[in-house]
Amino acid sequence: MASIPEKDPHWMAPEFTKPGQDFEHDDHVNLHEDVDTLIAQMETEIEAAGPQKDMFAINFKNPKHFTYFLVVFASMGGLLSGLDQSLISGANLYLPKDLGLDSKQSSLVNAGMPLGAVIGAFLISPCNEYLGRRMSILIACVLYTIGAALCAGAIDFPMLVVARLILGSGVGLEGGTVPVYVAETVERRLRGNLVSLYQLMIALGEVLGYAVGAIFLGLPGNWRYILGSSVVFSTIMGIGTLYVPESPRWLMHKGDYLNAFRVWKRIRGTETRESREEFYEMKSSLEFEVLQVSEGRTKRFPWMDLFTNPRARRALVYANMMIFLGQFTGINAVMYFMSVLMGSIGFDNTQANYMSLVGGGALLLGTIPAVFYMELCGRRFWALAMLPGFFTGLILVGVSYNFDPAVDTVLVQGLYLTGLVIYMAFFGCYATLTWVVPSEVYPTYLRSYGMTVSSAWMFLSSFIVTYNFTGMFQAFTGIGLCLGFYGGIAVLGWFYQLLFMPETKNKTLEEIDLIFERPTMVIVKENIKNSRATCKDLMKGRFRKVATETQRVL
């Protein structure tokens, strides 16, 4: 159950009608005065309280440098997640034979991590709500380390499955915490870019995992070294996380306004008008949410608002549809079984492991544009422009399986690798949205609960796709038709996003609240109107305008 922060006895909330309200009103001057009054009062309270003792506290002269520091270490969770996804691909070439696993046991070992991540996702709410974002990330690092060590030392099938489940629980907890932590700490004009960095780190981790597999390929018991290597990275991340502060929005959610302001000064500063106003808006928005919860029917169980509150319900449906489209277009099936898929088109074990770097590298390179231009182009642009690309890639990969690799080796491998590169490159940009969207659309008091649902759904979807992939291509009488099924979902997803996806770029988290306050049909009508205008721009060759227009993207 979410705790509802008590009123700070030393601060009286200024008049505030709605979170995220526009500052360009008649009371513009008065509002600025309220902001300055709040900041001055918080400064006075900090001086009165004296310096805070923290052996892990570090400071930078420029708050922006602190922001980059905490984002890099927090996003290392993505590196770990990607690393563990691709390490199993190389281990699959030798592990089943060494432990005597049959096809079903091998599938369960592969699917053990996403299944464990579902368990970890259910830790998000209690850990984030009561321990905070920072401590949740530290717990995830411990689970990563224990799981990887047990994988390396596994002596039989049950031990390996348990190890994969523990490892996965760390993935689930960290995957639902890090994007929220980043979204709550960085400024709005960088939020989409820096949350996208998490997906870039996943892609980097996947490439690194294939490289690690290649390094240990010639050693006896190579799969143990491959699976155990992530201990090094989880230890580095755990140490780095000790030096990052708690999320200021979480501290404020808990009623600890003074420490929230301390952290805000360290990571954002109070010199700029934008930073000062956002802190004021954040506090006022919290007061507004607390009032709503205390007056509502669900004040004892705020999580029920996800289903009973129209604004929260819209966010829940939207966030989880994005995750559905990210998972059920087959990415994890392709990633987990990439070495096996490479072997099915004529590569031997050594070649298959090295060629897996092609797919991982394409995913990494494809993610980079979204990291730099997520806020410039907006969420809708990346969603609608990328889906057709990885649909095309899936079709090429599927077609390659209609030829005999023993007869048309060059044709099969050429079609497969071309399709794989296109699929991975376009998916790299799209995958960033499955982290950006859920981390920003839920209201503050429901964010932990919303991310629990979204993360559980993400990893459950990954488990379903991964575990059933072998059975699917047998039922479809071929891998090509199976991949075509994923392509069909991509087509349907494109139309869903065209109609129902709102644009949230360059908005504070409080301003996004207002977007989701609007009825669904209002969003649909606006999207249809904007799509018509965009089509006209495309016909006239105004491509830059289409890519960068604030609201009117497709």
Image: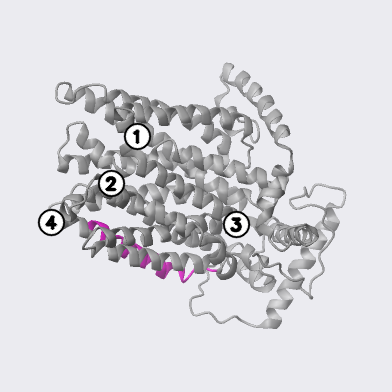
The magenta span reads: 226-245
The three-letter amino acid code for the residue at tag 2 is Lys
Nearer the viewer's eye, disc 4 or disc 1? 1
Q: Earlier in the sequence, mark 3 or mark 1?
A: 3
Q: Is residue 361 visible?
A: no
Quarter of the image for residue 155 reads: bottom left
- Amino acid type, mark 3: Tyr
Label 3: how many Cα within 10 Å (few below 14, some 14–19, many 20+) = many
Left or right side of 142 for 321: right
Disc 3: which residue: 449
Residue at (52, 67) in percent of width and height: 134
The disc placed on residue 472 is 1
Q: Which mark is residue 219?
A: 4
Q: Residue at x 49, y 37 (%)?
A: 325
Let me know if residue 243 is in the magenta part. Answer: yes
Q: Label 2 near label 1: C-beta < 8 Å?
A: no
Instruction: For marks 3 and 1, give the one nearer the viewer.
Output: 1
Q: Is residue 292 visible?
A: yes
541 in the magenta segment? no
Where does label 2 land, which residue? Answer: 104
Q: Name the element at disc 3.
A: helix
